[in-house]
Image (cartoon, rainbow, N blue to C red):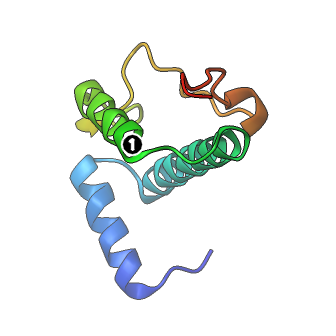
C-alpha cells in the first residue's frame, strides 16, 4: 500500500496518540469508512423508494445523532474516543438491502 507522505505523517501521529500500531489505526479508519459508505447507500436506497428526506427530517436525524454521541473506549487501544455508536447500536456491516429503513413517512 502506498500512502502520500503528508497523509502518512498524520496517520503515524494519530496512531501514536491513540497508542496503537499504524496497521491497527488504518484498519479502524477503513472500517469506519466502510460503515459510513454502507449507511449512505442505505439512505440513498430508502430515498429512492420513499423520496428525499426533508429539511425537518434531516434536522431531527442530526439531533438524534448528537444525543447518541458518547465517549467509549476504542475497541483496539482501550483509549476513550468520541463515537456516535452506543452499546445499543448495531454496527455490524451488512448488505445495504438488509440495512434499509422499514418505516414509511406519515405523508406517504
Q: Say how many tags the image has.
A: 1
Q: Quadrant of the N terminus?
A: bottom right
Q: Quadrant of the C terminus?
A: top right
Residue at the spot 64% in from the left edge and 49% down from the top edge: 44
Percent of width and height locating residue 32: 49, 47
Answer above or below: position of 19 versus 97. below
Residue at the spot 43% in from the left edge and 13% down from the top edge: 88
Residue located farthest toward the front when viewing the structure as drawn: 107
The quadrant in which residue 12 appears is bottom left
Answer above or below: position of 10 versus 38. below
Residue at the spot 44% in from the left edge and 44% down from the top edge: 54
Q: Specify whether residue 79 is in view.
A: no
83 or 45, which lies in front? 45
Q: Specify whether residue 25 is in view.
A: yes
The quadrant in which residue 49 appears is top right
69 or 80, which lies in front? 69
Secondary structure state at the residue bearing disc 1: helix
Percent of width and height locating residue 65: 32, 33
- Left or right: where 101 falls relative to 58: right
Residue at the spot 43% in from the left edge and 59% down from the top edge: 22
Mark 1 lies on residue: 58
Q: Residues within 10 Å of mark 1 (few under 14, many from 20)?
A: few
Amino acid at each position: 500500500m502506498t500512502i502520500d507522505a503528508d497523509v502518512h505523517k498524520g496517520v503515524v501521529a494519530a496512531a501514536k496518540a491513540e497508542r496503537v500500531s499504524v496497521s491497527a489505526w488504518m484498519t479502524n479508519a477503513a472500517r469506519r469508512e466502510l460503515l459510513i459508505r454502507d449507511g449512505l447507500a442505505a439512505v440513498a436506497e430508502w430515498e429512492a423508494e420513499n423520496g428525499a428526506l426533508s429539511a425537518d427530517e434531516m434536522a431531527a436525524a442530526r439531533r438524534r445523532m448528537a444525543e447518541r454521541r458518547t465517549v467509549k473506549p476504542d475497541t483496539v487501544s482501550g483509549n476513550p474516543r468520541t463515537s456516535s455508536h452506543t452499546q445499543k447500536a448495531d454496527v455490524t456491516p451488512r448488505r445495504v438491502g438488509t440495512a434499509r429503513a422499514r418505516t414509511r413517512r406519515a405523508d406517504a
